[in-house]
Image (cartoon, rainbow, N blue to C red):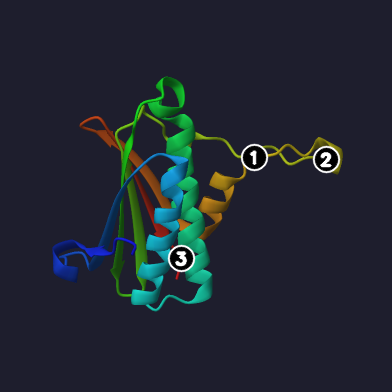
Amino acid sequence: MPELAPAGGGAAPDGEAYMLSLRAALADMARLSDWVDEVATTLALAPRRLFALRLCAEELVTNVMMHSRAAVEGTTVAVHIRLVRKGDELRLFVEDDGAPFDPTLVAEPARASSLDDVQIGGLGLRLVRRFATDLSYSRAGGLNRIEVTLAG
């Protein structure tokens, strides 16, 4: 059964909060997917919001896998995910202890002029930005912290 841990028993000063901790490893992506499904069911999210939440969570955790020290050194990077709902607003927090990586500084890839020029990959953050009303990054205490506010 997926972990569905309400923070503070489901009541938090900043709304309902749910948390998941995992490793930045391909094997843990199924746990993330199961957690997103269970949170979405608990919060009765509409299909579009579920899609946005899944896409953002999976893309941000994938970036941790690709850009953290785990990708370079083969070490384990811890990832902590928290989803907070306050009214109609959903805020997704992703924290990791990997190498510094600020997704807000990643430039949007140039549009290909033809199908022959299309390159695979590099579009995940573009999609996150499309579903987010706000995207921020900070680094403190050896942790990367990304906050995404999802459109209603």
Q: Earlier in the sequence, mark 1 or mark 2?
A: 2
Mark 1: secondary structure = loop
Seen at 33% across and 64% down, the residue is 1
Up-down relation of residue 126 to residue 88 (above or below):
above
Using the image, tell me which numbered label, if any, was put on residue 151.
3
Residue 2 placement: quadrant: bottom left
The x and y percentages for residue 56 are: 47, 54
Mark 3: secondary structure = loop
How dense is the environment of label 2, judged by Cα within 10 Å: few (below 14), some, or many (20 and up)? Answer: few
Using the image, tell me which numbered label, if any, was put on residue 113.
2
| Distance from Cα at disc 1 to Cα at disc 2 | 16 Å
Seen at 42% across and 39% down, the residue is 25
CB atoms of marks 1 and 2 within 8 Å? no
Q: Can residue 138 be seen? A: yes
The x and y percentages for residue 115 are: 84, 43
CB atoms of marks 1 and 3 within 8 Å? no
Residue bearing the label numbered 1? 121
Q: What's under tag 2, amino acid-wise?
A: Ser
| Distance from Cα at disc 1 to Cα at disc 3 | 24 Å
Instruction: Choose mark 1 or mark 2, whichever is in front.
Output: 1
Q: Earlier in the sequence, mark 2 or mark 3?
A: 2
Residue at the far front: name it: 1
Task: In this rendered view, identify the residue nearer to me: 82 or 150.
Answer: 82
Mark 2: secondary structure = loop
Residue 14 placement: quadrant: bottom left
Quick check: 83 left or right of 104?
left
Seen at 48% across and 69% down, the residue is 49
